[in-house]
Image (cartoon, grey):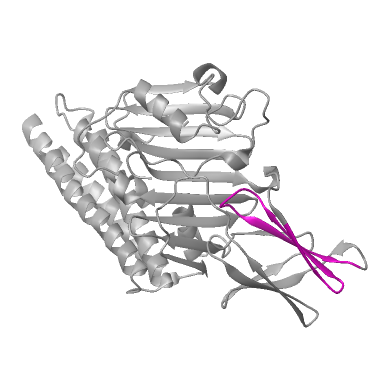
């Protein structure tokens, strides 16, 4: 299991869920079959804006990303030279302390940039294409800063009593929500390394979520800025973190559902990893607020059991819409009632969103608000409405 050193990791606990969490579930009894539809997700508060956009090849952004990476590599080269040229241990320490201080300032600026970009898009000051560009630029800058911190830490190995680990861990913790699997995939799509995919971005005054269907996986990233402490004070013990995790994810954490659970960290923050039947979740628990501020959920579409099923029929066409889980993706299947076989069709949601449904159906990201939908087949339109399903959200202490 990979560790994120941004959580001041000094202790790793990786236990089989049946040993670690026996009897902690608050959502089911021994006679009830557990459903992954009940696994909670991190909400972002009241949704204020939501859009669907297909991320496309963007050579200008790709060039800018490569430039940032090259600048980072050159900075590391300069630091290594500075350490080599320093005449004594104190001089070497000064070189590294100075660089960590510079990275700390850059990270604070980058975190503020992330916040401002979110708010500008939420307020309509920038378009969605620009938001996506800014998100992947910020993600790359964050990775460059993390790489710089790793480089500094490697340089400290031969210098005794340098004492930079605490500051490095604190900086890395602040950078956690600036990148994630969807943003990394967006970078890959912008550079042309991966095919274009539809991405849903949803925002509130306090947070942002991104969702994508990537091959046979549904992935969602969610961030709550108001639940990430700024000053970096306070913390909880590992036992308290375990108890809080059981409160946040009672179904996923239950030994009958969870295949493996890991809780890593000490002091201020913890990274929680839970694997379950249809996928996994990774969340970051803030030690001061004792709430999750960033979460990644990945679901295997083939392992989802359909929940709510809606059928719409007209003439020789039958449409079936299956919801994988509340607040999650949906599968749209179109049947020819005469042949009793699935057929391709064009699916329109709202004014601008167009999805081509394949034979056998297609998983798509569900809209977050009531939307008019149309299936267009052989020049005929079948119109119906899609209603959002309420998400089962993790409970925010002292707030929701």
Q: In which quarter of the image is residue 215?
A: bottom right
> Does residue 59 show up magenta in the picture?
no
Question: Is 39 or 92 nearer to us in this picture?
Answer: 39
Instruction: Give the magenta part as a residue range.
Output: 310-337
Residue at 55% from the left image edge and 33% from the top image edge = 251
Residue 149 % position (x, y): 26, 41
Residue 88 seen in the figure? no
- In this rendering, would 322 be left or right of 159? right
The quadrant in which the C terminus is found is top left
- In this rendering, would 323 be left or right of 236? right
Residue at 43% from the left image edge and 39% from the top image edge = 283
- Looking at the magenta stretch, what is its main secondary structure? strand
Question: Is 53 or 249 nearer to us in this picture?
Answer: 249
In the image, residue 376 sits, relative to residue 279, either above or below, namely below
Q: In which quarter of the image is residue 315?
A: bottom right
Residue 1 % position (x, y): 47, 30
> Does residue 327 show up magenta in the picture?
yes
In the image, residue 397 sits, relative to residue 78, either above or below, namely above
Residue 314 seen in the figure? yes
Q: Quadrant of residue 47?
A: bottom left
Residue at 35% from the left image edge and 73% from the top image edge = 126
């Amino acid at each position: 299991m990979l560790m994120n050193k941004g959580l001041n990791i000094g202790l790793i606990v990786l236990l089989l869920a049946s040993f670690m969490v026996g009897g902690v579930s608050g959502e089911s009894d021994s006679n009830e079959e557990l459903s992954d539809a009940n696994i909670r997700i991190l909400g972002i508060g009241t949704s204020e804006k939501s859009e669907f956009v297909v991320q496309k090849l963007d050579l200008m952004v790709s060039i800018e990303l490569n430039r940032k990476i090259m600048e980072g590599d050159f900075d590391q080269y300069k630091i290594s030279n500075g350490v080599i040229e320093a005449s004594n241990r104190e001089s070497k320490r000064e070189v590294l302390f100075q660089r960590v201080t510079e990275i700390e300032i850059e990270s604070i600026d980058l975190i503020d940039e992330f916040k401002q970009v979110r708010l500008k898009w939420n307020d309509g000051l920038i378009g969605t294409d620009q938001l996506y560009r800014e998100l992947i630029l910020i993600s790359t800058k964050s990775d460059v800063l993390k790489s710089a911190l790793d480089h500094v830490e490697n340089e400290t190995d031969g210098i005794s009593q340098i004492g930079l680990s605490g500051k490095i861990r604190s900086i890395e913790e602040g950078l956690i929500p600036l990148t994630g699997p969807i943003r990394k995939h967006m970078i890959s799509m912008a550079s042309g390394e991966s095919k274009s995919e539809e991405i849903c971005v949803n925002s509130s005054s306090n947070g942002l979520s991104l969702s994508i269907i990537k091959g046979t996986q549904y992935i969602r990233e969610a961030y709550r800025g108001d639940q990430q402490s700024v000053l970096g004070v306070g913390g909880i013990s590992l036992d308290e973190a375990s108890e809080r995790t059981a409160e946040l994810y009672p179904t996923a954490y239950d030994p009958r559902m969870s295949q493996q659970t890991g809780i890593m960290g000490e002091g201020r923050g913890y990274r929680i990893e839970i694997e379950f039947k249809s996928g996994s979740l990774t969340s970051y628990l803030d030690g001061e607020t004792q709430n999750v501020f960033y979460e990644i959920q990945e679901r295997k579409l083939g392992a989802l059991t359909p929940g709510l099923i809606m059928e719409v029929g007209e003439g020789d066409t039958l449409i079936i819409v299956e919801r994988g889980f509340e607040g999650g993706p949906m599968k749209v299947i179109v049947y020819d009632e005469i042949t009793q076989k699935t057929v391709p069709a064009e699916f329109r949601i709202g004014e601008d969103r167009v999805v081509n449904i394949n034979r056998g159906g297609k998983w798509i990201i569900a809209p977050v608000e009531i939307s008019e939908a149309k299936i267009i087949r052989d020049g005929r339109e079948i119109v119906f409405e899609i209603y959002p399903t309420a998400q089962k959200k993790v409970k925010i202490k002292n707030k929701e």
